[in-house]
Image (cartoon, grey):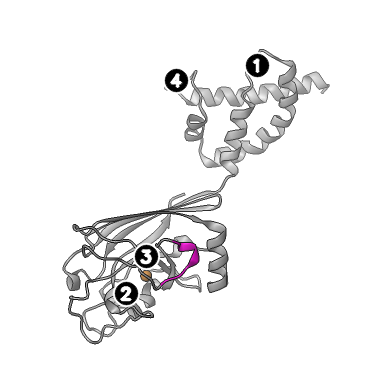
């Protein structure tokens, strides 16, 4: 194949791809945006075409300078390729009640964790938590690849009717990363956790620098792999006025079993 033949083949390849994208966008074929391209392509298709786009881009960028009647969509393709190579991982957890019979209110809610490049975006919505007080919240987990679980009544191994912190550890794993004002510091016993309003609701939102978090995680647990899909979101805390059996344990530094009592839990699942 001579050079003009190669140019024609390369351009036809790019145009065929472009045309296919336009056809997929049935609603308005003339307005192809990066968003519509992205939504119309499965990840696997993107992965399949990415290397072809990459090599064609290098060639067509010089070709476009000479062929002025072809629109320069190289930037669109470049963005498409970039979307494919950037790391975006999404996780969700549905928070279910723990110890609801003990505290007289059933906690529910959801958590969303999105790893995007160097940021872990965390969002939590909780309802039914004891109102007007702080609630310790973390993700818990094991360091031996076990998946943490939401505790059931079986978790109450001493049979006192309450799932306390040590009993929770056996099912959901140890305390790992706090949902506080600096998750990447992985500092647990303090007061800077979410507060429930008078109706027992609270929202939490934080963008965590992932490199710092992973460094800290490795320092504490020996690996920088957060293994989010094996972790469990935990919400703790009942008012000091709530009477608990003497058998309930769970003291962390200056904080007693009322602060650490598990009241809600949700297993984190990867959704892509
Ligand atoms: Cu916790």
Q: Which residue was labeled with disc 2?
A: 260
Distance of label 3 from label 1 (alpha carbons):
57 Å
Distance of label 1 from label 2 (alpha carbons):
64 Å
CB of mark 3 within 8 Å of CB of mark 2?
A: no
In what quadrant does ligand 1 lie?
Answer: bottom left
Label 4: element kind = loop
Q: Nearer the viewer, mark 4 or mark 3?
A: 3
Label 2: element kind = helix
Pointer 3 local density, CA inside 10 Å: few below 14, some 14–19, many at least 20 = some
Q: Is residue 86 above or below residue 40?
A: below
Distance of label 3 from label 2 (alpha carbons):
14 Å
Span of residues in magenta: 182-188
- Disc 2 within 8 angstroms of ligand 1 (CB): yes
Name the N-terminal-most of marks 1 and 2. Answer: 1
- Residue 177's spot in the image, x, y percent? 45, 66
Q: Residue at x 58, y 24 (%)?
A: 18
Q: Which residue was labeled with disc 1?
A: 70
Q: Residue furthest top?
A: 69
- Disc 3 within 8 angstroms of ligand 1 (CB): no
Task: Left or right? Give the position of 48 relative to 184.
Answer: right
Q: Residue at x 32, y 74 (%)?
A: 260
Indicate which disc residue 192 carries: 3
Q: Nearer the viewer, mark 3 or mark 1?
A: 3
Label 3: element kind = loop
Pointer 4 local density, CA inside 10 Å: few below 14, some 14–19, many at least 20 = few
Q: Residue at x 29, y 61 (%)?
A: 195
Name the N-terminal-most of marks 2 and 4. Answer: 4
Q: Residue at x 77, y 23 (%)?
A: 6
Q: Nearer the viewer, mark 1 or mark 2?
A: 2
Name the N-terminal-most of marks 3 and 1. Answer: 1
Quadrant for the N terminus, please: top right
């Amino acid at each position: 194949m001579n050079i003009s033949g190669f140019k024609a083949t390369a351009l036809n390849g790019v145009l065929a791809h472009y045309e296919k994208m336009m056809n997929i966008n049935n609603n308005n074929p003339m307005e192809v945006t990066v968003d519509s391209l992205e939504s119309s392509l499965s990840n696997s298709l993107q992965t399949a075409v990415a290397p072809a786009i990459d090599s064609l881009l290098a060639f067509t960028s010089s070709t476009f300078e000479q062929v002025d009647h072809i629109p320069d969509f190289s930037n669109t393709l470049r963005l498409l390729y970039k979307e494919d190579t950037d790391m975006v991982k999404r996780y969700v957890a549905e928070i279910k009640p723990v110890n609801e019979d003990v505290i007289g209110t059933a906690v529910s809610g959801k958590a969303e964790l999105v790893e995007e490049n160097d940021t872990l975006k965390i969002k939590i919505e909780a309802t039914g938590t004891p109102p007007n007080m702080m609630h310790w919240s973390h993700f818990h987990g094991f360091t031996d690849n076990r998946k943490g679980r939401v505790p059931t009544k079986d978790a109450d191994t001493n049979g006192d009717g309450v799932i306390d912190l040590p009993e929770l550890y056996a099912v959901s794993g140890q305390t790992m990363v706090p949902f506080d004002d600096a998750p990447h510091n992985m500092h647990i016993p303090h007061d800077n956790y979410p507060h429930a309003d008078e109706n027992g609701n609270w929202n939490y939102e934080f963008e965590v620098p992932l490199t710092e978090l992973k460094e800290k995680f490795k320092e504490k647990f020996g690996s920088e792999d957060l293994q989010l899909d094996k972790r469990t979101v935990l919400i703790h805390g009942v008012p000091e006025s709530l009477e608990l059996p003497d058998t309930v344990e769970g003291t962390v530094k200056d904080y007693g079993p009322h602060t650490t009592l598990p009241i809600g839990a949700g297993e984190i699942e990867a959704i892509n």
